[in-house]
Amino acid sequence: MLAALSLPALAAAAGTDPAPEIQRPVGQPQALGAVHTLRQIPEACARLEGQFTGQAAQPYKFAVVRTSPSCQPRARFVDAAKAQPSLAAGWTFNDLIRVPNAACPSQQAVVRVWRKPANVAPPKLDGQGQARLYLADEKAKAAAKQLAAVPMFAAVMAVEGKSCGG
């Protein structure tokens, strides 16, 4: 699940962002070298982390980190370059996170989080009023590629503003 994602092509296309589901102010300025959590996504067992590097070639490191090896995800975190999230493709613009660089106020990391919902319904109740999943039935569904859709998340990171030397 560790992935350093910087997708300038997707970020450039995101210049006209729709209103995100989550409204948040600009984050606190972060010092060079300080690893900081941008956001946690508990349903995907993931945490978004970032770090300003001070290097012109890669001014900001961005990673998706698994929160716990024992966490059972109810959603998947996918590579935004492959998923190509957009409103037209059924994705929802979930969050816009802006983090200024403390050493260079004209520069900020911008992370756009997209969410693709899935119509996940609980299993039907049996004669005893219990919702049950049977292993043989689920294996048959998996073999037939008929498993229920799982919600997905994707994140696009870009560094915006002017660099300060470096």
Image (cartoon, rainbow, N blue to C red):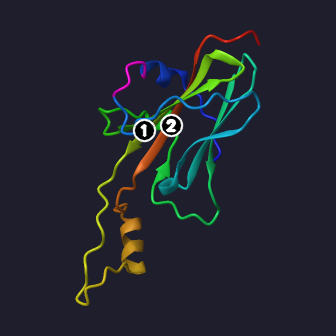
Q: Please, which residue is most extreme toward the bottom here?
A: 128
Disc 2 and disc 1: Cα gap in Å? 6 Å
Look at mark 2 in the image and give the residue it sits on.
155
Image quadrant where residue 34 sits: top right
Helix, strand or loop status at disc 1: strand
Q: Horizontally, is 108 left or right of 113 in the view? A: right
Q: Main secondary structure of the magenta part?
A: loop
Which residue is rendered at x = 48% and y = 52% of the image? Answer: 76
Q: Amino acid at mark 2?
A: Ala
Q: Is residue 161 magenta?
A: no
Q: Which residue is at the far left?
A: 127
Which quadrant of the rendered structure holds the C terminus?
top right
Q: How many numbered callouts? A: 2
Q: Residue at x 52, y 28 (%)?
A: 26
Q: Are marks 2 and 1 in contact (CB under 8 Å)?
A: yes
Give the residues in magenta: 14-18
Query: Which element type, helix, strand or loop, lies under badge 2?
Result: strand
Measured as percent of width and height from the top left, residue 14 is found at: 42, 23
**Residue 38 on image: x %, y %:** 58, 39
Within 10 Å of disc 1 (Cα), the crowding (few <14, some 14-19, many 20+) is: many
Residue 67 place in picture, x, y as percent? 62, 55
Q: What amino acid type is highlighted by mark number 1?
A: Trp
Q: Which mark is drawn over residue 114?
A: 1
Q: Position of residue 30 (x, y in %)?
A: 68, 30
Q: Is residue 44 above or below residue 23?
A: below
Q: Quadrant of residue 134?
A: bottom left
Mark drawn on residue 143: none
Work out whether residue 109 or residue 66 is closer to the camera in this orientation and state it: 109
Q: Earlier in the sequence, mark 2 or mark 1?
A: 1
Residue 105 vs residue 16, the one in the foreground: 105
Left/right of residue 131 with respect to residue 56 in the rendered view: left
Residue at 50% x, 44% y: name it: 78
